[in-house]
Image: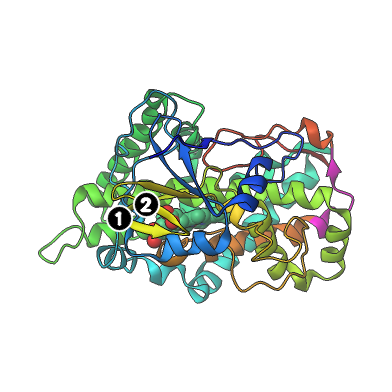
């Protein structure tokens, strides 16, 4: 391999907190794929265009069983301390495991079983905001509690444990921390789910996905090992709340700084569907991209990839590719799009996407209807952004109602 061109991670420009790193724009214009050096010193490839990125996610010669490419400098990649489940499996094994859960996540299941609950908790949080101080932190008042409540309801996790599982998730996903600190977060989550599963077995619980998965682990026709069950519980708990919370805070910030688009949405609440898709494209919260590993030598967009090479797709750059989206750097809530990479792409595209959509489509219109004068309490430059988390978002969002 020749000298890598780019050192990862390329970080965002704090002066343009809603845009992908400016360096990506140059890379994307120069060539579809470049050689990179990852933070731990290993080398691989980075894809910044949409078409080539979608090829990476669709090509069975590239495996989802990958090392962590964003491991901090000097540390050696190791597998996560828990079984990361089907997110790291290839077909046909991946499909077998994913199908254990898909029934819970269809648009119909979400609409019938979860939407009334989401409506209720969002209204309760809006009431609490109305009764509280005029200036408040939107993250603590809405963006964090609503996704936590929803994942607790889905999985059968007690909501009073939210501080523990959220802090552990933040530690585990913070690439600014050492591996020791991140693994501490992961171990907290493993121990927590292990104890919860034991408790559910003891009480023969029937409340939610964890209890359903226990049934698939025990008995003669078991399809999951105990380690896989715990891994799935951990995956759903962290993937199901931190992502949506990040997206909710960042979406609110974006609408608060795009006045015409916000007013258009307030006048036409029926545009919430296209608004949410556009926010997912525009913001693309997966901060350091997603990797796949070559199972054999192959050629991709003219680059010779060797067996074992790690290929990372910078989805935030791909979702701003002018070859795929007209005027990609403009937020346009009327945009008609057939596809984007906000939830990933291909067989691994987010399992929980209909849940996340339901939460965002409920919160955003209700928030601006209830508080039409909602505004930022600090200038955009002073909003603390999370530049090191696997999910990009706001750490705090002070607003005035
Ligand atoms: C706005 C919120 C969300 C975003 C941006 C998001 C993003 C993603 C992305 C990019 C992937 C692809 C991973 C890969 O290809 O390696 C993914 C997969 C996944 N997500 Fe989400 N997610 C969100 C919400 C949720 C929720 C609410 C849940 C659960 C309730 C969830 C559960 C999962 C699971 C289980 C996978 C693995 C799917 C597979 O490998 O087949 N996500 N998500």
The C terminus, quarter of image:
top right
User: Residue at the spot x=52%, y=69% of the render?
Assistant: 110
Q: Which residue lies furthest to the bottom in this view?
A: 108
The span shown in magenta is 368-376
| Residue 372 on the magenta segment | yes
- Quarter holding the N terminus is top left
Q: Are marks 1 and 2 in contact (CB under 8 Å)?
A: yes
User: Whole-Å distance between the Cαs marked 1 and 2?
Assistant: 6 Å
Question: Residue at (84%, 64%) from the top-left corner?
Answer: 266
**Quick check: can you spot residue 207?**
no
Q: Helix, strand, or loop for circle 1? A: loop
- Measured as percent of width and height from the top left, residue 166 is found at 50, 38
Q: Does the magenta stretch include residue 370?
A: yes
Among numbered discs 1 and 2, the one appearing first in the sequence = 1
- Residue at 79%, 33% (x, y): give it: 381
Of the pair 223 and 11, the residue shown nearer to us = 11
In the image, which disc is placed on residue 305?
2
């Amino acid at each position: 391999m020749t000298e890598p061109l780019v050192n990862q991670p390329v970080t965002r420009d704090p002066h343009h907190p809603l845009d992908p790193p400016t360096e990506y724009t140059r890379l994307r214009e120069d060539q579809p794929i470049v050689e990179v050096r990852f933070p731990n010193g290993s080398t691989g490839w980075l894809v910044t265009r949409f078409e080539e990125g979608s090829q990476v996610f669709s090509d069975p010669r590239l495996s989802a069983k990958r090392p962590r490419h964003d491991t901090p400098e000097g540390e050696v990649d190791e597998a996560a301390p828990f079984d990361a489940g089907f997110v790291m499996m290839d077909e046909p094994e991946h499909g077998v495991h994913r199908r254990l859960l898909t029934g819970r996540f269809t648009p119909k299941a979400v609409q019938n079983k979860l939407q009334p609950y989401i409506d209720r908790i969002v209204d309760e949080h809006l009431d609490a905001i109305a009764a509280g101080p005029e200036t408040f932190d939107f993250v603590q008042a809405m963006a964090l509690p609503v996704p936590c409540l929803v994942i607790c309801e889905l999985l059968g996790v007690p909501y009073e444990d939210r501080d523990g599982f959220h802090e552990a998730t933040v530690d585990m996903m913070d690439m600014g921390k050492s591996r020791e600190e991140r693994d501490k977060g992961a171990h907290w989550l493993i121990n927590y789910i292990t104890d919860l599963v034991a408790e559910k077995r003891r009480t023969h619980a029937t409340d939610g996905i964890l209890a359903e998965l226990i049934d698939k682990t025990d008995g003669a026709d078991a399809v999951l090992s105990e380690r896989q069950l715990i891994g799935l519980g951990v995956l759903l708990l962290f993937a199901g709340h931190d992502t949506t919370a990040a997206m909710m805070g960042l979406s609110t910030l974006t609408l608060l700084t795009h006045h015409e688009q916000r007013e258009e949405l307030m006048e036409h609440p029926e545009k919430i569907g296209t608004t949410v898709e556009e926010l997912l494209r525009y913001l693309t919260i997966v901060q350091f991209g997603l990797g796949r590993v070559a199972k054999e030598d192959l050629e991709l967009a003219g680059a010779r990839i060797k067996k074992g090479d790690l290929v990372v797709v910078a989805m935030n750059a791909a979702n701003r590719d002018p070859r795929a989206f007209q005027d990609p750097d403009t937020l346009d809530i009327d945009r008609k799009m057939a596809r984007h990479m906000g939830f990933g792409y291909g067989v691994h595209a987010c399992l929980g996407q209909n849940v996340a959509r339901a939460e965002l489509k409920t919160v955003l219109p209700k928030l601006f209807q209830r508080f039409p004068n909602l505004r930022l309490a600090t200038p955009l430059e002073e909003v603390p952004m999370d530049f090191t988390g696997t999910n990009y978002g706001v750490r705090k969002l002070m607003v005035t109602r």
